[in-house]
Image: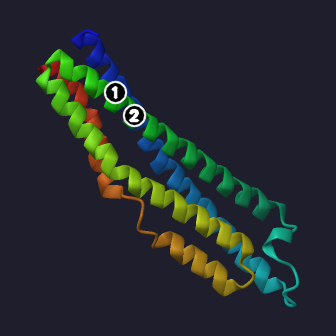
């Protein structure tokens, strides 16, 4: 493989990684908005369900169920995004092995830097997904206003989405092409 094709491949992987991380941030924000809406509607519904006989799974409010379905769909999209990030990391490993043979020091250093940053962020993304999935599942079984509030609070204070790390990695990914074109 030529150095130019290695660099192109690296830029493509970086662009895909950037897009997936951006998607992750957008999905997380959208998911939080939907969750807040579901919780608010769920609390209102629970306040009007005086005998407490109906669980959330049997809530007849189509709006709440539609939004809950959107939450579950967003979790699926986050899971798919995580798979894409993992795929990018595998491709970077392979690309690094090829680039070592090309003796392109700048490219090798950049690949190593990006791969290291992806490796650091992936456990956080996995934990973020795991927590979001658990909170949404818990919300599905919440039978009291207090439990709904606990789910919402857990989401708001959920510490696993690495905002600063994500922003830093996205900046690294944006800078890749500039660094490669200047070398």
| Residue 149: x %, y % from top left | 61, 80
Query: Any mark on residue 94, and which?
Result: 1
Residue farthest to the bottom, as pictured: 51
Q: Quadrant of residue 58?
A: bottom right
Label 1 close to label 2 by CB (< 8 Å): yes
- The residue that disc 2 covers is 90
Q: Is residue 160 above or below residue 5?
A: below
| Residue at image coords 31%, 42% | 170
Element carrying mark 2 = helix
How far apart are labels 1 and 2 at the CA level? 6 Å
Taking depth in this image into account, of 3 and 25 the one nearest to the observer is: 3
Q: Residue at x 46, y 60 (%)?
A: 127
Q: With respect to residue 56, does 7 lie above or below?
A: above
Using residue 5 as the reference point, say whether residue 52 is left or right of it.
right
Quarter of the C terminus within the rendering: top left
Asked whether residue 175 is in view, the answer is no
Answer above or below: position of 92 versus 125: above
The quarter of the rendered structure image containing the N terminus is top left
Tell me the tag on residue 16: none
Report x, y in % for residue 133: 60, 61
Circle 1 residues within 10 Å: few <14, some 14–19, many ≥20: few
**For residue 29, side relative to residue 11 (left or right):** right
- Specify whether 179 is left or right of 10: left
Secondary structure of residue under mark 1: helix
For the image shown, how many numbered marks are present on the structure? 2
Residue at x 27%, y 38% (from the top left corner): 114
Give the image quarter of residue 105: top left
Against 51, is 87 above or below? above
Give residue 80's position: percent from left, percent from top.
Answer: 56, 42
Residue drawn at (19%, 18%), measured in percent from left and top? 101
């Amino acid at each position: 493989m030529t150095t130019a094709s290695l660099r192109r491949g690296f830029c493509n992987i970086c662009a895909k990684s950037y897009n997936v991380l951006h998607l992750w941030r957008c999905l997380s924000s959208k998911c939080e908005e939907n969750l807040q809406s579901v919780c608010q509607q769920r609390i209102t519904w629970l306040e009007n369900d005086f005998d407490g006989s109906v669980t959330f799974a049997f809530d007849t409010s189509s709006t709440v169920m539609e939004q809950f379905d959107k939450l579950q769909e967003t979790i699926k999209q986050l899971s798919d995004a995580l798979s894409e990030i993992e795929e990018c990391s595998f491709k970077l490993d392979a690309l690094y092995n090829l680039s070592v043979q090309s003796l392109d020091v700048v490219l090798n250093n950049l690949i190593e830097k990006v791969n290291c940053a992806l490796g650091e962020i992936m456990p956080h993304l996995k934990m973020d997904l795991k927590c979001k999935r658990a909170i949404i599942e818990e919300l599905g079984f919440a039978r009291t206003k207090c439990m709904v509030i606990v789910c919402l609070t857990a989401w708001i204070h959920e510490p696993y989405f690495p905002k600063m790390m994500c922003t830093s990695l996205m900046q690294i990914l944006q800078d890749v092409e500039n660094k490669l074109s200047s070398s």
